[in-house]
Image (tube, rainbow, N blue to C red):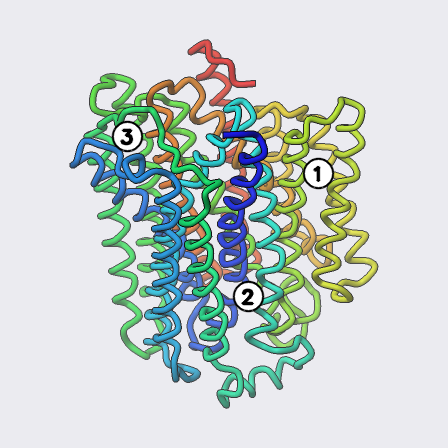
Amino acid sequence: MTNQNNKSALTTLVTVFFFWGFIAASNGVFIPFCKTYFNIDQFQSQLVDFAFYGAYYIGALLLFILSSAMKKDILNNWGYKSGIVYGLLMSAIGAIVMCFVVNGSEQGETQIFYLVLLALFIVGLGFSLQQTAANPFAIALGDPKTGSHRLNLAGGINSFGTTIGPVVVSLIIFGSASWSTDELASMIKSNQITLMTVQSLYIGVGILFLVAAALFYFSKKLPSLKSETTFESANKARNVLIVLTAIIVVCFTMIFMTYTGDTVPTEAVENKRMLLLLIALLAVIACTWFANSNASKKAEGWGAMKYPQLVLGMLAIFMYVGVEVTIGSNLGELLKQAVTGTNLNTLGLPVLNDAELAPFISLYWGGLMIGRWVGAITVFDPSKGLKKVLLIIVPYIAFGVILLVNFGKYTTNEILLFCICIAVQIGGFFLAKDKPVATLKIFSTLGVLGMLIGTFASGQLALFALLSGGLFCSIMWPCIFALSIAGLGKYTSQGSAFLIMMILGGAIIPPVQGKLADIFSIQSSYLVAVACFAYLLFYAYRAKVVLDKQGVDYN
């Protein structure tokens, strides 16, 4: 394939990256709206993330189990192009289901909420298949050495979707951000604002999925592409993942059963829910530890999991996706929730309503776009001097895009505060010098500090410390991914599939934080984010030790 065809193919491919970002980030607006509309608690509202990101895990796990049973890689048999087409069609089915379940729904119909989760789960299953195919597809469209740069470029497009998603969805649902809190509550209660607006959104999204599927299917510039690696069985790894899935399903089923009545939950019930969530979370940690411990003694049957950098990296991806999602998904409730007896929220800032949240959700996800645009600079192979200039200019150009999307929504003081956060991120890029371990160490440390300030400070200092989490998360995915699959050889493809499964973090960690918020307070619940960044810092140090011991070049 010629270089020009490669560029055309990559241009077509990145459209799906945009979809993922648009839908995922719009959940940040959809979650607090669901909490108000369906009269549910913070944990229940976070089930939006549980359904959406849980589908990534289930989809990747089913592919792995079926491939193991057939002793061949199903996705490789289809080809990456066909895998993306099938994934888009699956997501289109989810969009159609969403249109049906919200049809005629009214405020307070909690049972409809669970059907909405089902529709999101189907959309997420399609995304799981798309992402499993699209990541290696992007790498295959050119020199493998520059594959990570193409992923960064695609990630930048994905993050553009995350930036405009909350704004577009907010406009579709609310029509305007000028409603007062009382007016908005009255309009929702009287069904003047309903889920029918979401139906219109998903009709449009479903059509776009079908158009994209047709574009991929009929495009002559997109090769089918298949991996040359043979499928490696890993029965012990499969069994551990099945056990983990069973534990998670049992825990969440037992939690759901406690929500069947209309009575106000007692302290004992809330504690039971929290315990079950912690069991699900600890099961992920315990299963990865078990795999790492046993594979180091006897590697047979573990496949890619016999490499400690991968198993520890799986937990790192779990924590990374979890912290990235949970910061944004709980942010809306933080800005909405008033301190008892005041019109100020827990940060000491004016209380916002559902219609006013989008600019701040957009700013958080926009922070990820800023970092990923910087990460994509290397794709264009600039000179050393120009690269230094671009490291300073590109972040502020990306910030300009965020300001344009949210024109007139931020005060001068808010713009200056975020500019300072960006300056800190730029300093991190200069110190890291494109080295994965150094990058992960620096940005994990900044993430820990940002979340601690956000948890214990107040006012705009606390708010922008939390918003900076997007800036610090932005560049972590490629670093974790690169370190996790370094030195895996013929197990690289299988290792990548295991890492995609650990997007499960986006399904588990937000509900854990949501329940902590129900029991304690929304601001103190952000200690969950501190713990996630702390593990990522540990992984940066541990991965270096493991890879050095193996003699693997990872820089």
User: Does 294 appear above or below 550?
Assistant: below
Q: Residue furthest bottom?
A: 190
The kind of secondary structure element at disc 3 is helix
Inspect the image, locate mark 1, and give the three-letter code of the amino acid beneath it.
Answer: Gln
Disc assigned to residue 540: none
The kind of secondary structure element at disc 2 is helix
Give x and y (percent) for residue 239.
20, 36
Tell me what residue is drawn at x 57 percent, y 73 percent: 172
Residue closer to the observer: 215 or 484:
215
The CA distance from mark 3 to mark 1 is 36 Å
The CA distance from mark 3 to mark 2 is 38 Å
Which residue has dot 2 on it?
A: 29
The kind of secondary structure element at disc 1 is helix
Query: Which quadrant does the C terminus fall into?
Result: top right
**Residue 411 left/right relative to 443:** right
Residue closer to the observer: 43 or 124:
124
In front: label 3 or label 1: 1
How packed mark 1 is, by other alpha carbons closer than 10 Å (few <14, some 14-19, many 20 or more), is many
Which residue has dot 3 on it?
A: 290
Tell me what residue is drawn at x 49 percent, y 50 percent: 16
Which residue has dot 1 on it?
A: 425
Task: Tell me which label, 3 or 2, sits earlier in the chain.
Answer: 2
Give x and y (percent) for residue 165.
57, 60
**Residue 98 left/right relative to 457:** left
Tell me what residue is drawn at x 28 percent, y 42 percent: 61
The CA distance from mark 2 to mark 1 is 26 Å
Give x and y (percent) for residue 280.
32, 48
